Image (tube, grey):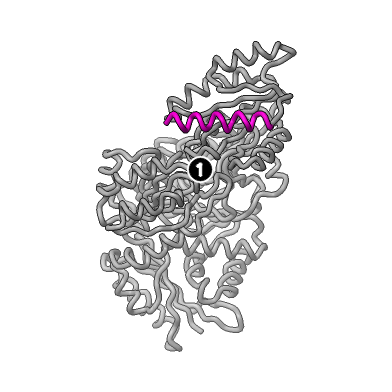
Amino acid sequence: MNTHTIVLGVIGADCHAVGNKILEAFFSRAGFRVVNLGVMVSQDEFIDAAIETGAGAILVSSLYGHGEIDCAGLRERCLERGLDRMVLYVGGNLVVGKADFSATRDKFLAMGYDRVFPPSVELDEVVRLLEQDLALKAEAR
Amino acid sequence: MRVLSVDIGSTWTKGALFELRDGGLTVLARAQTPTTAHLPEGFTRVEEELVREAGAGERPRVVWSSSAHGGLAVAALGLVPDWTLAAARAAALSAGARITSVFSYQLTPRDLGRLNAERPDILLFSGGTDGGNTAFVSHNARVLRGLSRDTVIVYAGNRDAAAEVADVLGDRPLELADNVLPDLREPAPESAREAIRRVFLERIVEGKGLSELVARTGSAPKPTPLAMLDYVRALGRDGRLGRFVCLDLGGATCDVYSHGAATPEEEAVATAGLPEPVTKRTVEGDLGMRVSARPAAAAARPWIDRLLAARERAAPDFEAWIDAIHADPSRLPADDREAALDAVLATACVGAAVARHAGRIEIVYTAHGPTELKRGKDLRGFQTIVCSGGFLSRGAEVLPAFSVLPFDERGRIVCAPAGPRVLYDREYLLPLLANALDAAPEAAIQAGIGRLLAP
């Protein structure tokens, strides 16, 4: 596992491309080797790319409100396919409407994601957490 | 200058004697003979006949290719099927290989048993992007210590694991090449292709009984499909054919070559999977007109059913024809009825082979309405079809192959050419001109395009 390689993409049938480009630029500048799969990425494409590149984390974006359906089962699928220490992050407009974010966060934590972010999150903070989480996973090996 | 071009196929050894004068190539003589068990025999027969027919002249430069004795047999090993395995497969095909089998993830003892039973000439061993996974490669290298020494390993996987692979497998036939997929978005087949070519020349030519010819002609052969792929690329650069597909349908296989890059409009559609090469080859071992007639009748069944219905031909008649050519692969149609049935088989083979070569478009319903998602090579805007090979070059009707079945078995759009013009290699000269490409590049290109475009 490479603690500096991360896989990035927008999950499901979601075509929101702009935020994805911003994330790629930001994480690259922060020193990560970013494998950006772009928009409309399936769960298996995330996993395939993570296996092939030996990535330490998968960062999933979802902007169009179907995040709950698209993101469910990714942790289980990772385990099934041999990625038993993958750091999984998810962020964006994860559900439709103005639901309370803490409820959304709990829902996605229960699905097995390590961190859940609203669209308003400061990316510096995400980088800090990501470095910390990757170091922990690396130690656990 | 005279150029003597010979192609040793699995059934026929074909040749032509060209004269290069004032920058143009003219055909002085043609000859063919059944391929002999000892390959140089048939070669010599063709050579003598050509020289006899053309009359004495200067000593010709000899250029030649071979696909005899099973061609260049390559097995491919990758990590994830859609990534490094797909990249390794594409690299092997672009080197002119016939793919014997493919393996992904961890190689099992059973997989090793299969490899040792098949004994391919080469195992193309990939896995991991540069800086990516090394664990699978490391495991697979250890399993491959049990591989037969008849198979040369070409390692083209993660650069970080190359030293370990050389350590573990260094005492057996091994070539190291650059990674076929250094980065997920950038397949790099060139180095692996070059390594395969080197192995072909240094070790395989000997085993196929061709070294005698190398010594006598003073020139090295190319695998036939590699010569054709290089020629297709050269024809494409000329521009007059536009973006095009070249079909070579034989008794055992159907080769499909395509040349052309995606337009900005085509690139605007959301795509998944590996980027497509500008010049691409695929080969189908189960789609052929004689030796493979029976598997073709099964694999191309959806096309056959529709074509038989459209041409009001009875299915039992067709089955009887398949039985007849299966029993006697040298059988040719004796009358119009048999010719029509043979034509159905040819068109169906083309339909199935091009459908496998072409990409797919899936309509995905999103929050913004229906959206297209594309995988593979989009041939819909390709303007030209070039028909080569004994069964198509005389004027086969191939267009229905692209229109009778617009969707695949999962309801996705097949990105086959939409309204192309069809050009015929009527004298079946393209493979022989392909051999002449290195000796007289410009003349070989002009002669090929001139013949295709001739009214």
Assess disc 1: are there few (<14), some (14-19) or many (≥20) residues with their C-alpha within 10 Å of its C-alpha: some
> What residue lies at 45% left-to-right and 41% top-to-bottom?
B133
x and y, in percent, of residue B56 in the image = 42, 88
- Amino acid type of the residue that numbered disc 1 sits on in the rendered structure: Arg
x and y, in percent, of residue B199 in the image = 37, 63
**Front residue of this view, candidates A50 and B152:** A50
Question: In the displayed structure, would residue A109 be above or below residue B260?
Answer: above
Majority secondary structure in the magenta region: helix
**Front residue of this view, candidates A101 and B32:** A101
> What residue lies at 50% left-to-right and 59% top-to-bottom?
B190
> What residue lies at 67% left-to-right and 42% top-to-bottom?
A29
**Front residue of this view, candidates A34 and B187:** A34
Check disc 1 and report its element: helix, strand or loop.
Answer: helix
Residue assigned mark 1: B356
Taking the image as drawn, is residue B411 in sight?
no
Q: Which residues are magenta?
A: A124-141
Queried whether the magenta region covers residue A135, the answer comes back as yes
